[in-house]
Image: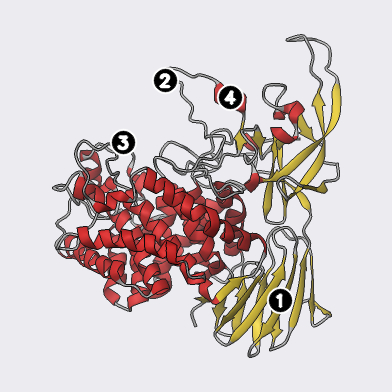
Amino acid sequence: MKTKNISFDKIKLTGGFWAEKQALIRNAAIMTVYDRFKDTGRIDAFKCDRKEDEPKRPHFFWDSDVAKWIESVAYLTRLEKAPELEALADAIIDNVEKNQSDDGYFNIYYTVVKPGERFTNRNNHELYCAGHLLEAAIAYKEATGKDKLYNCMLKYVDLIERVFMIENSAEFTTPGHEELELALIKLYDCSGEDRYLKLAQFFIDKRGANDKDTPNLEKNGCGYHIGYFQDQAPIREQTTAEGHAVRLCYLYIAVADTAYRIGDEGLKNAARAVFDNIVSKRMYITGGVGSTPNGEAFERDYELDNLVAYNETCATLSLALFAHRMQELFDDAKYADIAERAMYNGFISGMSLDGKSYFYQNPMRIDLHSHKRKMGGRFKIEYPITERVSVFNCSCCPPNITRFIPSVANFLYTLDGNTLRVNQFMESEGEFEGIKISQKTNYPFDGSVEITYGGEEKTLALRLPCWCDGYKLRKNGRRIKPENKNGYLLVSVKGGDKLVYDMEMKPTFNFANPRIASAVSRVAVSVGPLVYCVEGIDNPDFTSDKCGLDNLRIKLDSKLEMGFDTDLMLPTVSACATYVKPMDALYTRKAPEVGKTKVKFIPYHAFANRGASDMQVWMLF
C-alpha cells in the first residue's frame, strides 16, 4: 500500500510556533503582500488594459506572484472563512476570465507587451506562470467551491497540451523555469484524468533529451549553461544538483511525484541521488540552498561561502517541499529531518517577526563594514541586503511564505497501511481516516510532546530527530523502549492511549566538513532543530566598526547556557569566548593581551529584526 499524506485541512494547529505564524499571515502578511502588489501594478495588470505611456509595464513573472497570493487566500479560507480576502481574489479571477484568449491562452505580459510572441522564449516564464495559476485554481476550487479560475486553467492546459505535446509547434519543448510539471500532477490528482499526468511526464522525459531548447536559449540571448536549466542530461541520468536552485527542486518535486504515481524506478533513483547530493554536499546548515548569486544556483560540492551566500527563501522552501515528497517514496526519517531543518531556519528567516517584511536572500554572515566598501570596475561583490523589505522587483518569496505557512500541517502525518508516521511536531488536533490524534507541545523550543490517540489499533511511528541524542518515551505512564526503524520509533497504539515523548534538547556545537573553506576552524550552535547565530547588536564590543565578530573565539570546553530575550521573546544561548584586546599599534612584535567574554546567540530565523547588524552563524574556535 502506498504512503498517503494527510492534508493540512484535516488538522488544526491549536497553539505554538506555527499557529502564531499562521496568525501573522492572516492578520498582517497577506494584506501587506496584496497592498505592495497593488502599489507596484501587479494586481491591476490582470485587467490587461495598460496604455503605452503608463510606467507600470507588466513583467513576465507577475502572473506567478499574484497566483501565489490567490493560493494563499485559498489555504487561509480552507482553515477559516475570510470573505474580504475572497472578494479580492474573486476580482482578480474575474479579470483572468475576461482577458483569457479564446483558445485558452492567458499571460498578462504576452497579452499586453508582446502579443505576437507567445511560446517563443523559453526563459520568459510562460509555463512557470501557468503552473502557479493552475496550483492557485485547484486550491481555490477546493477551498471555496468556486471553479471559475479552475475552468479557465483547464482551457489553458488544453492549449499547452496541444501546442507542446501534440503539435510540437512552440519554439521550445520544456519549461525554462520548472513548476508546471508539479502543478499538472496536482491537476491529475484533483480531476482523475490521466492525460494531465502524461503531460507532466512528457515535460520530464523531454528534459535534456531534445535538441530544440538549447538553440532557443541561445537565440534569446540567455548566457547560462544548459545545466542552469537542468538540461545537461535526461532526468534518469542526472545524479547531482545543478543550476538554478528553485528550478531544480521544483523539477524534482515533480519527478518524485511522478515516480510515486507510476512506480518508475529510474525517476525514483534520480530523485534520491539528487536529493542526497544536495543534503550531503551542497546545503547550508540552515537548510539554505543555491549558494551563489550568479544564477541563484548550486555550485560545486562543498562550495558554500558564508559572506555572499545566496540562499533564496523560495529555494529553501522548495527543498522542504522536495523532502516532503520524498517521505512518500521512502520510509526514512532523514527526509523529515531535512524538511524540518529548512522550515525552522532558512525558510522562516525570510519573514520578519511582525510578518510585514521579507528577505529574498538569507545570508550566513553579515559584515556591515564589508557591505559598505565601494568596489569599482570588474571587482563587484553582490552582498545580500541587511534588513528585510516589504516587496522586491522579483517578489516571488513573500507570496511563497504566505501560501506555505497556512498549509504547513501538510508536513505532520503520513499514513502507510497500518502505520501512522508522525513526521513533525506541532501543537495540533487532527481527525482523519477514523483517527483522532492531538499533540501538545512547545516545539521547537521544548522537546516534550504529549500525544493522545483515538481510533483503531495502529503502529505509531514517531520520528527520532537526527539532532536528538537521547529520549524518554512513556505510554500511559509506563516507560517503553520501542524498535527504531529508519529513524522512527514504532509504538503500538489503540483508542485512548497517551504517549509522552521527551526528546533531549540541549545546546550543541556543530562542525563542518573541512572542505567547506568558509567554515574551517569554526563552530555553529544549535538547539534542537533551531540553528543559532551571533548578532552585533547583542555583542556590541565586537561589531565590524570595532574589532569584528571574528575577533571572538568560542571556547569549546565551555558550558553552553540557555537564556531568554524578552524583546525578541525567544530563547538564547551564551558561550564563553576569548578575544584579542584592542591596541594602538598597527603591528607589533609583542604578543597581544587576550581577554575573556561571553557571547550571546539567538535563533537564526530571528536575525535582522532589530535593525541592520553584523551577524554570523559560523564562529571561530
Q: Compare residues 217 and 162 and report the one nearer the observer.
A: 162
Q: Which mark is residue 370?
A: 4
Q: Marks 4 and 3, how far apart in space?
A: 29 Å
Q: Marks 4 and 2, how far apart in space?
A: 17 Å
Labels 4 and 2: the sequence-earlier one? 4
Few, some or many residues within 10 Å of mark 1 (<14, 14–19, 20+): many
Q: Residue at x 74, y 10 (%)?
A: 587
Q: Which mark is residue 223?
A: 3
Labels 2 and 1: the sequence-earlier one? 2
Using residue 313 as the reference point, say whether residue 486 is left or right of it: right
Labels 1 and 3: the sequence-earlier one? 3
Give, as a three-letter code, the residue at label 2: Arg
Using residue 180 as the reference point, say whether residue 405 is left or right of it: right
Q: Compare residues 229 and 609 and report the one nearer the observer.
A: 609
Residue on which the image places disc 1: 451
Vertical side of 62 occupied by 322: above or below: below
Q: Residue at x 33, y 39 (%)?
A: 224
Dot 1 falls on a residue whose secondary structure is: strand
| Foreground label between 2 and 1 | 1
